[in-house]
Amino acid sequence: MNEYDSNRILELTKKINFFSTSDVNEADCYVLNTCHIREKATEKVYHHIGRIKKKFKDKKKPIVIIAGCVAQAEGEVLLKKEKYIDAVIGPQSYHEINNIILEKNKAKNLKVNKTEFDVIRKFDELNLIKNRENKVSSFLTIQEGCDKFCKFCVVPYTRGPEHSRSFSEVINEADQLIENGTKEIILLGQNVNAYNYKGKKISDLIYELNKKTKLERIRYTTSHPNDFSDDLVEAHRDCKKLMPILHLPIQSGSSYILKKMNRNHTREEYFKILDKLLKVNSSMKFSSDFIIAYPGETQDDFEKTISLIKKVKFINSYSYIYSERPGTPAAKLKKINEDVAKERLVKFQIIANEIKKNYRQGLVNSFVKVLFENKSKDKNSYFGRDEYFNSVMVKSSSNLCGLIKNVKVKDWTHNTLYGELNDASKPKEFAA
Ligand code: SF4
């Protein structure tokens, strides 16, 4: 989502003749768009500012703006502690960036803190600018914020309450992207399947996008089990352009821990969703997020997480030891012994990697359908993704960007599949 937001910030600043530069030394304005989901986010901001200070030691100071969730959560502290920062803008206020830059140019000592949850006005402003992104695969924000208040998470405090963009605005932006050459749209939201605009749901968007002749693939992320309604399951049955992979975070395999996290669903309810999806589309595969050693997690709870990953065989499992976020209810809970936590993470990752290894090994000599996105730095190699979002590299002397090709997998690493083009493969044509 930050990548999407950064591109929108750039489109906005173009209106006042501020363009991106690959040479930071010539920048008049430096925008650091931040994420607060991981540890030490604030320290990283100070570290970056330190580097910028050094670069501009003997030059005119650029305007320095901290955007995103760290700005939202720690804005006032950042402004007080680091005088080099001129402005902080929360993720729902970045439509104000041009005013800030123009004001700042007039008043050198001005300090600005914009951290309102002004999401309606933000989307109104964004609808007025064209999305000029011309990538083969593009993000499209349809929903922001979260009302779920999982006890460990800062998002409801940094991104604010759930808000869905209007159905027509989303489709208009999708049309722009397709016109610019986009072949794959990834619908984005903190709780993307909580999308609800006057009764229109994410499934309605997917059915509508599925009709777009020049669009080849649709994905969405990140969804929540509690919002996984049957209409979305049916979209996986009906919409051939909707890819058969679902990233559905569960965080723990223990219903007791899920309750303590305020996830509001059980392990069994999670399994039910996956079963329904497999029933309508047997080629579905899954990935998930896990918090290991959440406060109160017993060895038995942890073993339930292990049994869950063994049962589902996630093709990707993203795991982290629990670390507290300031201001969240879980931050007050007693943490689990560090050595025990590390031991559990290691065990989890060994098993998760074994599952992933078996999956990848099983792909060798099979064919995957790859949408190619760009040429790699290594000449004549092209990068793309298969239907399951696996990164794939192939060598080719002809330009593959924007094409879907059948690729025979020859080798694999943890992050990439390596393959060769199947000579008989032709660019895939999709019917509306
Ligand atoms: S649903 Fe996701 S974004 Fe919302 S509070 Fe829980 S973890 Fe955070």
Image: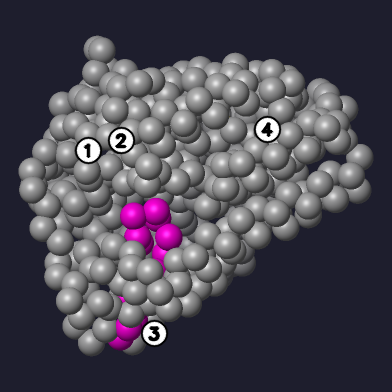
Residue located 81% across and 23% down the image = 332
- Image position, residue 175 (x, y; %): 13, 42
Between the residue at mark 1 and the residue at mark 3, the CA separation in whole angstroms equals 36 Å
Q: Which residues are magenta?
A: 380-395
Question: Are discs 4 and 1 less than 8 Å apart at CB?
Answer: no
Question: Are discs 2 and 3 less than 8 Å apart at CB?
Answer: no
Residue located 46% across and 31% down the image = 275
Tell me the SS state at disc 4: loop
Between the residue at mark 2 and the residue at mark 3, the CA separation in whole angstroms equals 36 Å
Question: Which residue is situated farthest in the top direction here?
Answer: 198
Looking at the picture, tell me which residue is in the foreground, 91 or 176: 176
Q: Earlier in the sequence, mark 4 or mark 1?
A: 1
Residue 139 seen in render:
no
**Residue 369 appears left or right of 262:** left
Tell me the SS state at disc 3: loop
Report crowding for label 3: few under 14, some 14 to 19, many 20 or more residues within 10 A (C-alpha): few
Q: Is residue 382 magenta?
A: yes
Q: Earlier in the sequence, mark 1 or mark 3?
A: 1
Find disc 1 in the rendering and name its residue: 239
Disc 4 residue type (three-letter): Gly
Label placed on residue 8: none
Q: Is mark 2 within 8 Å of ligand 1?
A: no
Find disc 3 in the rendering and name its residue: 378
Find disc 4 in the rendering and name its residue: 253
Report crowding for label 1: few under 14, some 14 to 19, many 20 or more residues within 10 A (C-alpha): some
Between the residue at mark 1 and the residue at mark 2, the CA separation in whole angstroms equals 6 Å
